Image (cartoon, rainbow, N blue to C red):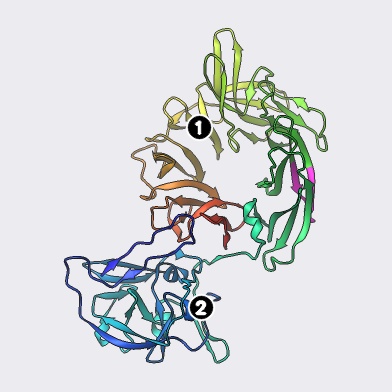
Amino acid sequence: MDLVRKKWAGHAAVFALCFSLLAPAGESRAASAGVRVTLPEFKVSLNGHTVDNQHREHPLLVYKDITYFPMTWYDSRLLGLEAKWAPENGLVIAQGQVSSSYVSYKTDHQNAASYSAEVPASAISINGKPIDNSKEPYPLLSFRDVTYFPLTWRFAHDEFGWDYRWDDAEGLDIRSHNPQILNPDLPASAGGNDVALYKGYYYFAETTGNTNQVYRAPVQKPSEKEPVYSYDFLGVEPPRRMVHFRILDNELWFSYFVGSNLMGTNIYVKVNDDGKGEMKLQKGGYTDFKKTPYGTLIIALGPNDWEGNLYLESPGQRDQRGKAVGNPNLLYGRHVNLGNSSFIVDGIGTGDSAEVIGDDVYIRASTSNHSDGYDLNKIYKINLKTNETKKIVNTEISRFRILGEKLYYVKDADNGLYSSALDGTGERKLSENAVSWFDGINGNVYYTTAVGEDKYRLYQANPDGEDPPVLQERLDGVQLLNGKLICRLDEKEDYGAMVLDGSGRLVLAVADPISHLLTSDDAILFTTSGDSTIKVIR
């Protein structure tokens, strides 16, 4: 018996190769008996999904008046089960912290009314309990090289804790209690733009001609959409229809671009409590901003803002440049390096360009007007009340964060992760590997290190010893979202993503391949690889 690992097929719809009951090459196969099985003549629902057994490659079956469930990769994980095969243990079925979207396994042919299945004599255990399949009144079966187990009260209810209901009109309804991956009933075009989930509403955009209309729709009734904001993108070359959502200080914002590439403008819109969008910022070029007690801190990152690109705007101020902040000879926010004795901007650093703590702004900055040469990528502290500007980390850094009462930053020299007090004193190296990304949660600091082109491994920083790997799998990336680490796995790994808590423990393994995480305040909202289908885990 061999566990065939699931594979992905390019840009086609996902599919699974399932748990085979054939012995590995060179090994003898346990004896099997043949039995007659039929297809259900009643409706079957799995977590609310009606199963089309007539056109399914792996239909549910009936044997001795008991319905049998196929242990395919996706079906098992849909109901929170994992199955593993090992020569020494045989087939092991157990509840796990797993989930999957519903996959129909639909074919273009219709199944017959009855088939022959086999009763395997191989070793089997369920939730750690051995099963003597030869003595079971309702044994596990094998059909089309997939293991089937009986949906008896003993297994479905006692072992797996499922809600198990029969109704003469509605048929058999099985519901598990693992987190469910759902497809919100949003317009098909929504996946081609950005989407957000905020305070019980989905936010998305629809394009008609040269107009984008931003809508919101309640999670419980996604079809009942209501307008939030609209704008024209006529004259944008090339057309930029994308709306970008983000949650800033527990408020939902979105931005969009209008005008030409050289003379265009970014518009920033806040969604008010009544669900209507209100334009708050209108800035040429790329702009990052932070809320402060003295107004909005603007970090102008357009091509013409090489120095003096930091200023404060009072509420309602849009058209004229605000009050200058900090040293006007410094270039703020960007990460730069040298090329032929000139600045080369190699990253914008959204999200870690600045931190605001009370009256103080911590920000990365560079200058080129020193008599002794360039001074690049240092961390400065600017007091917004006095405008005192002080360099506090005198080493080149690529990114930084304030976590708790400390600064954390990655040095350009060795790509190592370091920490210090907020005044830059007491520096300490935290990582033993080069760092590509880092963040902190519940007092723990995690980082990724590159292990190939655009592939990473996740570690926990341990300044007192060896950094333990958190996952053995290769990752496409990690994000911190709502107190959880969302790890997108390489397509060659079994799962699409793993969700970890603040201690690095597995919360959920997600079978679906995730291409992008979307903005959300209390759930995991994402698009799947290949087809940009929007899905949510609540």
* Label at residue 409: 1
Horizontally, is 357 left or right of 473 in the view?
right
Q: Identify the residue at the far top of this view.
A: 371
The x and y percentages for residue 478 are 49, 47
The x and y percentages for residue 225 are 74, 62
Inspect the magenta stretch and tell me whether residue 98 lies in it: no
Say if 167 sits above or below 189 in the image. below
Between marks 2 and 1 in the image, the one whose residue lies nearer the viewer: 2
* Cα–Cα gap, marks 2 and 1: 52 Å
Query: Where is residue 358, by image quadrant?
Result: top right
User: Which amino acid, mark 2?
Assistant: Val
Can residue 20 be seen by looking at this rendering? yes
Query: Where is residue 111, by image quadrant?
Result: bottom left
Name the one closer to the observer, 469 or 519. 519
Residue at the location (57% across, 55% down)? 532
Residue at the location (27% across, 67% down)? 2
Residue at the location (73% across, 39% down)? 236
The x and y percentages for residue 492 are 38, 53
* Label at residue 51: 2
- State which region is magenta: 268-279
The x and y percentages for residue 409 are 50, 32
Horizontally, is 313 left or right of 59 in the view?
right
Label 2, secondary structure: give it.
loop
